[in-house]
Structures are given as C-alpha cells and as structure tokens.
Amino acid sequence: MCGNPRGDFEIEGVSQDLIDRFSKRHREIDEKTQELLARQPEKAARNVQEIRANIAHKERARKIKDVGLTKMRSHWKKQLSFRERFQLHRLDRKTSLAPAAQRITPEQAVSWAEHHLFDRRSVVHEHEIWRHALDHARGQDFSLWEIQSITSRRDYVRGEQFQGKVTTREVINREWEIVCLARDGIGRYGAFVTDARSTNVPLGAEQRQAVEHILSSRDFVTLFRGGAGTGKSYTLREVHSALKRKGCPVQVLTVCQPKELALSNGDRLQLKANSKAQDGRRLANGELVTIEEIHADGRIALEDGRVLPKDYRQFVRGYAVTSYAAQGKTVDYVLFSDSAVKAATNDRQWYVTISRGRKGVQIFTADKHQLRQNIARSGDRPLALDIAKPEESFAHRLARIWKRDVAYVFDVRRSQHESAQRQAQSIGESESVKPSETVSQSQPIRQARSIAHKHHQTQTIRRGMHP
C-alpha cells in the first residue's frame, strides 16, 4: 500500500488510470464543485474542502441499493481490459509484507493469542482468539480460515451451556489449585488481631463487620468484595491502619506492565503506587498530579512542590481514567466517554462510572442503542470449572480433565489433606486447628468453589502477603 497526502491510501500496483476510472463518486463531486464555483466565483475564496464535503453529503447521487455482489462483479469486469484483469489477479500473488525475520506461522499467532487472552481471563470466545491471532500476524500471508482450522484442532474444553466459549485444561487445573489452596487453608492460622473490634465511628455497620472479619480471619485466603460505591477502599484503609498498629507488615500487590512514556512540563499523571516523595510527603495510589519540571537525573517535580524520586515510575497519563481505576473516588461531575469495545462496558462497570459523581454525569457515546445493550450485559466472568459439565462432581470433573479414574483423584486429595494436617501440627497447638475443624464443611467448600466466580471487585488478603 502507498499513502496519499490527504491521509488515505492506494493499493500499490493499481494504475492511476484504473483508480480514476472507478472513482466515479469522487469524480462526480469534482465536477459539481467546478460547476458551483463557475456559477458563484466569489465562493472560490472560501474553504473548497468544506464545499466538497457539503456537495458529497447533499448533492451527489445516492448509492444503488439491493444490487447483488455477483451482478456488481460482472459490471466491474466489463470495464476492465484483459491486461488490467491480469494485473489485478497478480496482486494477491505477492509475497508476505512482513520482513523475513518477522514472519510467523499461523500456529505461532494462535499460541500468542491464547497466552494473551488466557493470562487475563479463564473463559474466552473463540472468535476473540481468531481476532487477536490475526492482529498479531498483521502483514503475514495467511488467512482467517487457516487460523480457524488450527483452533478447531486445539484441545479446548467446550461446554454446551457456553456456546462459542472455550477454555483450556491448564486454566481449569490452575483454578482448581486456587480452590484447593483456599479450602485447605480454612482455619489453619492465627488471627491477625485477636480483639478485632473497630472503633472507627465513620464506618458503617457492614463496613465495621467486614473490618472485624478480615482482622480476625484464621484462613489462608480471605475475600473482601462489594458493589460499587459501598466503601471498599475506605474499609481496606481501616484494615491497613489496624494491621500497622498491630505491627504486621503490609504489602500491597498490583500488576504493572512497563512501557515508554514521553513526558513534558504541564503533563497530567495518575500515580499507580503508594510511596513517599523526596521530602517524605505521601504519594497515594490513584492520585492525579501535574508535572512542573523534569530533572536531568530522572526526578520529576510536581506543581504542589513534591518531587517523584528517579526510581518512581509507577504512573500513567492522568487526563482521563478508566472506570476500574476510578473505584473508591468521588467527584462532583463525571464525563463518561463510552468505549467502542463491547467488552469494556457492562452493568458493573456502568454502575461504577455513574456512582462516582455527586451532582451529575455527562455521557458521550457514538451509539446509544449499543450502549443500552452493553450496560444490560452482566459483568460476571464465567469460571473455567463451569465450562466443564456442571452436573459432574468435582472429583469426576478432575478425573476427566486429568484423564485418570476417580480413585486417582481421591488418592491425590487424600494425600494433600494428610500433608495439610501434618503442617498444621508442626506449627504448634496454638496455631493449629482441632481435628474436627480440619474436616471441610459444606458451606466453606461452596464458598471456596466460588472464589473465581466472584473475583471482580475483590481484594485478596493472603497470609505472608498482606494487601
């Protein structure tokens, strides 16, 4: 392809004469523009592009509707010479546009798409794998059909109740390990705080109950979740303060992806990690700041007088934030720009967005009908364990996934259970649990099984890593 000054492109190898011959609507606009300027020459001093745009919108002939592709192709071929048809036929015989060192196979493209998607979600639509594989392989010389052929032969796990959605056995095993980790850790540890009564007056009843539950938890994994606007961030700050007063080390974990970011004076940033400025003042995760000056040694001076150390690079541009990043924040007015990506908008993200504003929300969207459909869509993500036959027991499901018999699964679980008991006994009677407590009850099991169901808006507190 070759670019044009006006910003569009032409296909390399197609003659200009052929381009002009098939640019009928373009030629019609040119002719009508010349006729108008001949009748009203005083308009020549105006913006000719605006005149052309007005003619294109109001005066040119409308496209012919309900004409089949076969008929259109026949009409096009009549306008081509034998030599021109031969030249066009040779265009798709050219080699890959990608340099030899950058060429990848369809299998590599699919593998990349799988890693990219399943690293973020347990269950995806198969067409998402096709799209990301093609996007990764842009410039290569293979087709969608080849990508689809590869995914059809993949050993994906599919479910009748999840039409078009797939997962992998590796993802299912990973989820099962998380479930077992949480289940086997129930009641095995001492509480963070023995007397976990919160005295923070501004906390609501449910917030205070959540704080006391987290601080008194004896489980390896404790989940804390709630709807948008219920004060999850404020509640966790109280948990953080209580752990600090108790002398417990607290580490907040997040996932960052390094990338280059060109900055200049006056740029707005959103800080993405708690830390301290050079003068000891606090840097808060989610805070919006403005750059005053960038020093040669990498330090960044802010307009409020604080200076980001040269090794503090946990920030992104702060002119706008996602609804996810806006959780826990409240402003007077919200300007909501709807994403063109369907997956970015659902009922949960919508509620997070509109609940940030005290006085009002202004919505910008290119498609109101599509937005209505998106916000009615559930934001819950299916669990990989659900895509297997839901009527099967966990043991039967694991036996089928591992390609073993049920007895093997029970042997594995029994071995893990005995190992957990030995570990509990080794840490002393005060920290271990009674024998009757090591038997998982039905309600804790159901709670453990729903771990990955409810990971949206969830804060996880792990023993040894205390967010």
Image (cartoon, helix red, strand yellow):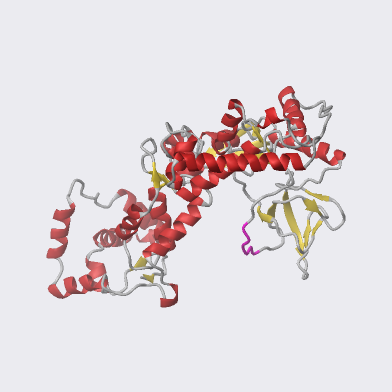
Q: Residue at x 57, y 30 (%)?
A: 446
From the top left corner, tell me how far across and down residue 325 is, in percent.
Answer: 63, 44
Q: Describe residue 269's horizontal placement relative to residue 70 as left or right.
A: right
Q: Describe residue 137's horizontal placement relative to residue 247 as left or right.
A: left
Q: Which residues are magenta?
A: 257-262
Q: Is residue 45 above or below residue 99?
A: above
Secondary structure mostly taken by the magenta-highlighted segment of the chain: loop
From the top left corner, tell me how far across and down residue 387 is, in percent.
Answer: 43, 39
Regarding residue 162, the answer to whether it shows in the image is: yes
Q: Describe residue 388's horizontal placement relative to residue 264 as left or right.
A: left
Report if residue 259 lies within the magenta region. yes
From the top left corner, tell me how far across and down residue 77 is, in percent.
Answer: 14, 64
Regarding residue 384, the answer to whether it shows in the image is: no
Q: Is residue 300 above or below residue 96?
A: above
Name the one closer to the observer, 416 or 454.
Answer: 416
From the top left corner, tell me how far across and down residue 258 is, in percent.
Answer: 63, 61
Q: Residue at x 74, y 25 (%)?
A: 209
Report if residue 365 lies within the magenta region. no
Q: Quadrant of residue 240 in the image?
A: top right
